[in-house]
Image: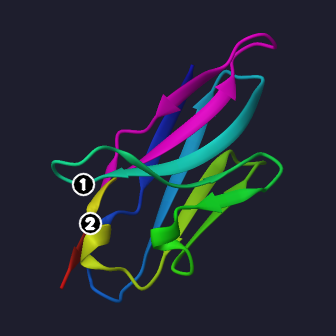
């Protein structure tokens, strides 16, 4: 199993910046995709950004130009740099790690979530 820990959330004014970090540890053959999701009150959890193990990134349109996702394969970490934050970015942000426990299986783990609040 893979243990996922997020950090870096908090309260910031609109236009400000935050950096979220996520570290994965445990038993696995390889970590494939690492990503960030968010869930606002009363809303479904949505994908924000992901990065594959070859460095390919993808971000949802609403954060393009403001958020950047990066990854350190040697440390099994992924970060989300969030700039020009807006009140609508307020949500609990979750790190998701997709990995292979064995050569023949796939699995995924979630972090506990970190709150991001953007005040207007």
**Looking at the image, which is closer to me, 46 or 105?**
46
Stretch of the chain drawn in magenta? 93-116
| Label 2 crowd bin: few (<14), some (14–19), many (20+), radius 10 Å | many
Image x and y of residue 52, in percent:
73, 47
Image x and y of residue 72, in percent:
72, 55
Cα separation between marks 2 and 1:
7 Å
**Looking at the image, which is closer to me, 100 or 59?**
59
Residue name at image x 58 percent, y 37 percent: 97
Image x and y of residue 41, in percent:
17, 52
Relative horizontal placement of residue 103, taking residue 5 as reference (left or right):
right
Q: Give the mark, 2 or 1, whose residue is nearer the N terminus.
A: 1
Residue at the far front in the pictured view: 61
In the rendered structure, does residue 89 fall within the stretch colored magenta? Answer: no
The residue that mark 2 highlights is 90
Q: In this view, does 33 lie above or below 12?
A: above
Residue name at image x 37 percent, y 80 percent: 85
In the rendered structure, does residue 105 fall within the stretch colored magenta? Answer: yes
Task: Give the main secondary structure of the magenta stretch.
Answer: strand
| Mark 2 secondary-structure assignment | loop
- Image quadrant for the C terminus? bottom left
- Image quadrant for the N terminus? top right
| Mark 1 secondary-structure assignment | loop
Residue name at image x 31 percent, y 80 percent: 86
Give the image quarter of residue 98.
Answer: top right
Residue name at image x 32 percent, y 69 percent: 89
Image x and y of residue 36, in percent:
50, 51
| Label 1 crowd bin: few (<14), some (14–19), many (20+), radius 10 Å | some
| Label of residue 51 in the image | none
Circles 2 and 1, Cβ within 8 Å, touching? The answer is: yes
| Label of residue 40 in the image | 1
């Amino acid at each position: 199993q893979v243990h996922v820990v997020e950090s870096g959330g908090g309260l910031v004014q609109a236009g400000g910046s935050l950096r979220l970090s996520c570290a994965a540890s445990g038993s696995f053959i390889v970590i494939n995709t690492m990503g960030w999701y968010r869930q606002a009150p009363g809303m479904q959890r949505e994908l924000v950004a992901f990065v594959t193990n070859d460095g390919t990134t993808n971000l949802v349109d609403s954060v393009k130009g403001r958020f950047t996702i990066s990854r350190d394969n040697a440390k099994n970490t992924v970060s989300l740099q969030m700039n020009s934050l807006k009140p609508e970015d307020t949500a609990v942000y979750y790190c998701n790690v997709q990995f292979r426990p064995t050569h023949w299986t796939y699995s995924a783990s979630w972090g506990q979530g970190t709150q991001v609040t953007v005040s207007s």
